[in-house]
Image: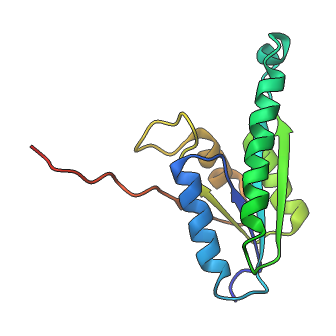
Amino acid sequence: MWCSKILVAYDGSAPSKKALEVACSIAAQDRSIELVLVHVLKLYASLIEAGVENLLVDEANATREVLESFADTLSNPTHVHLLKGSSPADLLLRCARDEGCDLIVMGSRGKGGVKGYLGSISYAVVQQSPITVLIAKDAPETGAEG
């Protein structure tokens, strides 16, 4: 198989859900492929000082629990990590290195990203990663055009 361990960045956004779907499709080809599901809690000094830290931690823990429940349904070996820090791209790259991943799958943009543009975190990971990065985009909206 062309990859053996996949890091998936997940924040609950549509593109990150697509990234999880794509990574699971790749892993389904070989049950020995490991998945590392990662959620990043970006720490902002100003929010910590304002007392918002507990809300952010609670939200991050809820996302981690979603990932752990999902991991329990998979036949591939799967690990879940909650990373905390001020630079999500650096945290993702360090985790990929420390885990021995040979592929990173992430969404084109996270929560709050501008549709149609590569987000700053995904852009930084693509630029700095020594391993292959696959960018998953959520499906374009379809609808009647007038």
Nearer to us in this view, 25 or 115: 25
Q: Quadrant of residue 132?
A: bottom right
Residue 62 is at least partly visible in this image: yes
At 61% across and 48% down in the image, what residue appears? 122
Nearer to us in this view, 117 or 52: 52
Quarter of the C terminus within the rendering: top left
The picture places residue 117, in percent across and down from the top left corner, at 45, 43
Quarter of the N terminus within the rendering: bottom right
Q: Quadrant of residue 6?
A: bottom right
Judge left or right: residue 92 versus residue 21. right
As drawn, 72 above or below 87? below
* Residue with the most extreme right position: 98
Q: Quadrant of residue 38?
A: bottom right
Judge left or right: residue 116 versus residue 70. left
Nearer to us in this view, 84 or 146: 146
Judge left or right: residue 111 versus residue 77. left
As drawn, 46 above or below 134? above
As drawn, 111 above or below 50? below
The picture places residue 31, in percent across and down from the top left corner, at 75, 87
At 56% across and 46% down in the image, what residue appears? 13
Nearer to us in this view, 111 or 105: 111
In the rendered picture of this protein, how many numbered marks are placed on residues? Answer: 0
At 64% across and 73% down in the image, what residue appears? 24
Residue 130 is at least partly visible in this image: no
As drawn, 75 above or below 113? below
The picture places residue 92, in percent across and down from the top left corner, at 77, 51
